[in-house]
Image (spheres, grey):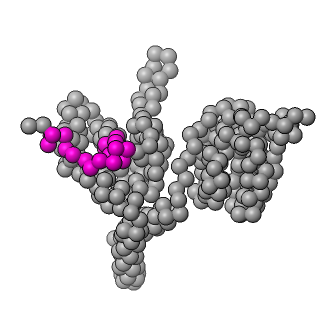
Amino acid sequence: MTSPSRQGVHVGIDVSKRTLDVCILPSPAGGPDGETFVVANNQAGIDEILSRIGGLGPELVVLEATGRYERLAAISIAAAGIAVAVVNPRQARDFAKAMGRLAKTDKIDALVLARFAGVVEPRASVIPDEEARALQGILVRRRQLIEMLVSENNRLKTAPAALAGRIRAHIEWLRREVERTDDDLDGAIEGNAAFKANEILLRSVPGVGRVLARTLIAELPELGTLTHKRLCALVGVAPFNRDSGERRGKREAWGGRAPVRAVLYMGALVATRFNPAIKEFYQRLLDAGKPKKVALVACMRKLLSILNALMRDRAIWRCPHALTP
């Protein structure tokens, strides 16, 4: 039996809290469904994966995004110099259905991910470094605190008098926690020269505040490295056609990174009032009869395009109107 070529080897890893199911295609032993094995989802298990795939020279390793359980594997594999793509589980499941794989087990999912890597060839993910992951964690905690604060304020409106005082005390505690978390964010930015420089670039654009700038730094590391269309699709503000035959469906934007999209929405909303370029663009769309929501999503794309260009060129934003006499 001949050993597989160093070219064309793809690896799929199905992730759970405790285990990693791995499939290598083509199999080093020549099996039709690849070589599969299971390891613990810890550093020792990941080291075993690296020892088994390292000599094969895989083109790509694909894992599903689980929220957190895939992070250690993705970081360790990328650190070993192997391309890693962390993909949306819905993409992988739709691919499995297209293959006729209706059953779902960890072993089957690993095989599907390996085939997905070879057929679809998703773009390798940008894996954040330790400081970027720490910044992400602080931002996530801030979002959680804000959500709890909103919920408690809503509860206070209908709470009986016996509970209102305790809810107010909790609200005050949450506000102090948000302030402390903002201080943590300030410290993380000030302690990293690259973060600080990027924040200065991003906040030079009217409409971009601290929360948007820091969310982009932590959760959109691809900013400045991708084309405008790819970046819009990644964030989830790119409109997709829904056409069939003579029918022309409504174009919709969906998917992508929801936390980034949420703060980008608020940034675009502010920019329609205070950023001359976005304000003029927004008004032109409204004058053309576009609904406000459609015009605002278009402004989100335009703002993202501006920020992408600034990060790519490492240039402070200048209002286009200021460049003309």
Q: In this view, does 132 lie to the left or right of 319?
A: right
Percent from the top left, x then y, of residue 172?
Answer: 35, 79
- In this view, the residue in front, 311 or 165, is 311
Residue 189 appears in view = yes
Q: In this view, does 148 lie to the left or right of 102?
A: left
Q: In this view, does 319 lie to the left or right of 216?
A: left
Q: Quadrant of the N terminus?
A: top right
Percent from the top left, x then y, of residue 35?
Answer: 82, 43
Q: In this view, does 66 lie above or below 224?
A: below
Q: Main secondary structure of the magenta part?
A: helix
Q: In which quarter of the image is the C terminus?
A: top left
Percent from the top left, x then y, of residue 27?
Answer: 82, 39
Q: In which quarter of the image is residue 119?
A: top right
Q: In this view, does 116 lie above or below 167?
A: above
Residue at 72 percent across and 42 percent down: it is: 57
Bounds of the magenta span?
A: 303-323
In the image, is residue 189 part of the stretch drawn in magenta?
Answer: no
Numbered-mark total: 0
Q: Is residue 220 above or below residue 185?
A: above
